[in-house]
Structure formats: structure tokens, C-alpha cells
Amino acid sequence: MTRSPVHREDLVAALGAVAGAALPGCEWRVVDSPHSYTEGGLQLDVRCTDASGGQRGTGQRGWLELAEGGLIAPWLLRRAGLSPGEWAGVAVGIGLDRALMLRKSIDDIRLLRATDPRIARQMLDLSTYQPVSTMPAVRRDLSLVVSSGSDEELLGDRVRAALGDRAPELESVQLLSRTAYADLPEPARARLGLRPDQVNALVRLVIRPLDRTLTGAEANALRNDVYRALHEGEVVELA
């Protein structure tokens, strides 16, 4: 907060300082990103490469959002008991987990909270992460009936809530396709028990615990639990 005027250039400089401090040597840019609590909202994107020119950390390609910010909106200042005519400031939110993953070249967010001592002791500094093991992934594809408003984020949240303590065994939930009621032939609708307000979703589970390899039976049991958590159709198909 300051009693001096704050301008867009100040915000860009603040976001640039965040990028430089958190991820020295990485490229950064800002793009417009409106927020209800700011004016002139901006998004800070970064792009980090390793010595060979490859993408570094998080398993992403290209630009990755790191932070958002803007000039504090007048209504928010007034709510805090401050006059917008006298006070100004910058509000910035930073994705600290994402910054750490980029800084240490980590592709799996679960590593940040792993209890394996070989992993946990590497999370005490900012040096590049050294993999301790590579477990093979197990993939299971599910054909599900879900509400038409379901997206990948919502499905992922439901899966993690359903699995509880076993959620870390699941690396990702990918929504591969959605097929509306009108786009399916009648025999397929009947087989799925699909209603007009539902869609047929093809979902891929990538199962990969950090410390062991699951047996086929264990992977199928987890697959079935995910199926029960997501499937809203009248016909149930378990592995």
C-alpha cells in the first residue's frame, strides 16, 4: 500500500520482480487478465528451459501461468476503510507450488509432499530434483455417463474426494472426449442408460504410486472405485 499513485508500469515491474526472484533465467511476459478485485489485471506467464533447450518442470509446454495481479480496485480499498483518493496498491497472487516445480525441474506435484526420505530431503532446498525411481504407469480408460456440465476439473475433484487417502496413487484424470445424447445412436444410449441431460465421457486414469507398482487387481479395484464415484448412468460396467 502507498499514498503515491500506482500505474500499470508499477504492476508490470512488480510481476517482473516476482519472476526474476522465483525463477532467475526464465523468460516472462504479462497478458491482460481481468479480476473483480483489481483494475488493469494482468497474468504473469513464464517459460523455462534447461541447458539442452528442453522444457523444464511441471510437464507443460510453452508458457505457463505463474501469478496474477492488478491495481487494487477502489471498492476494495473502501471496504478496508481506505480512501481511493489517498491510497493505492498492487494485489498479486503467486502459484508457489508451480514456481517450486519449475525451479527444481519437477513434473509431478505429488513429489512436493512425498514422505519417502529420498524425496522429502530434496524438498529442503532449491537444487534440481534428482529422480529416485521411475514406476511404470497403469492406464485405465472408462466409458462413463455424467451430467452435461461436467468438465475435467470437476471430475478430477470428485475422484480425489472419493479416493481419500488413496488419491496420491492417481497421477492424472484426463477427459478424452464427451459425446452428447443427440450424437449417439439409440442402441448406444440404451446400453449406457443415457438421459438427454447427460453425456458419454471417455476418461483416462493414469495410476502411478510414487513408491511401488500396483498389481493388475489393485489397479482394477481403484478403477472400479473411480467408476462408481463418477458414473451416473443406470447401467454399471465394472472391470
Image (spheres, helix red, strand yellow):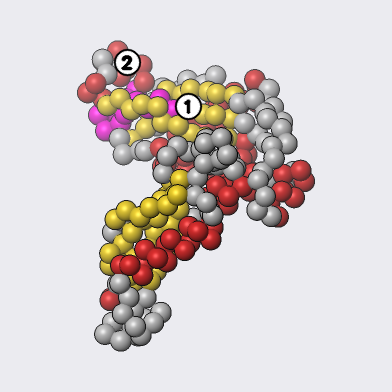
Residue 88 shows up from this direction:
yes
- Count of numbered tags: 2
Residue 120 x/y as whole percent: 72, 48
Nearer the observer: mark 2 or 1; the answer is: 1
In magenta, the rendered stretch is 193-204
- The residue at 36%/16% (across/down) is 191
Identified by mark 2, the residue type is Ala
- The residue at 65%/45% (across/down) is 128
Residue at the farthest top position: 187
- The residue at 65%/20% (across/down) is 216
Residue annotated with mark 1 = 204
* Mark 2, secondary structure of its residue: helix
Question: Could you give the CA–CA distance between mark 2 and mark 1, rounded to whole angstroms?
Answer: 20 Å
Splitting the image into 4 quarters, where does residue 85 fall? bottom left
Contact between marks 2 and 1 (CB within 8 A): the answer is no
Dot 2 or dot 1, earlier in sequence: 2
Residue annotated with mark 2 = 188
Mark carried by residue 238: none
Residue 136 falls left or right of residue 33? right
Residue 231 lies, with reference to residue 82, above or below; the image says above
Residue 91 x/y as whole percent: 39, 69
Identified by mark 1, the residue type is Arg
117 magenta-colored: no
Splitting the image into 4 quarters, where does residue 188 fall? top left
Residue 51 lies, with reference to residue 73, above or below; the image says above
